[in-house]
Amino acid sequence: MARKMADCRRWPSDTNCSLTIIGEEEEVIRAAAEHAASVHGHEDTPELREQMREFLEPADAYSNEPRAQEPLPG
């Protein structure tokens, strides 16, 4: 199974979050949802987890270089 990545640097945040989570898809979704709730104040819902699943990237796309932020989807 291919490893996935959730990279907080991709999105604007009040805290300028730099967390990147890499692992198996379900591990990343679980950790990213917990992070979104505890750090960013989002509610951990099935809808949030599904939205996160759509935003996952391949782990091999990771770079330690600064990343341009994307606008949050509507």
Image: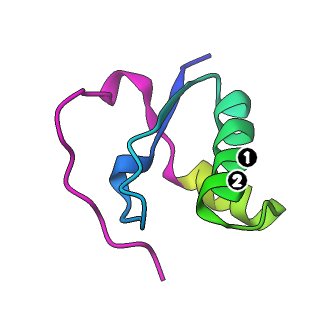
Percent position of residue 19, x then y = 45, 38
Asked if 52 appears above or below 18 in the picture, the reply is: below
**Which of the two residues, 14 or 26, is positioned nearer the viewer here?**
14
Look at mark 2 in the image and give the residue it sits on.
Answer: 38
Q: Quadrant of residue 40?
A: bottom right
1 and 2 marks in contact (CB < 8 Å): yes
The dot on residue 4 is none
Q: Distance between the residues labelled 1 and 2?
A: 6 Å
Q: Quadrant of the N terminus?
A: top right
Q: In this view, does 14 lie to the left or right of 4?
A: left
Q: Main secondary structure of the magenta part?
A: loop
Span shown in magenta: 55-74
Q: Which residue is drawn at 73% across and 46% down?
A: 34
Q: Is residue 24 left or right of residue 10?
A: right
Q: Quadrant of residue 71?
A: bottom left
Q: Which residue lies furthest to the bottom in this view?
A: 74
Look at mark 1 in the image and give the residue it sits on.
Answer: 34
Residue type at tag 1: Glu
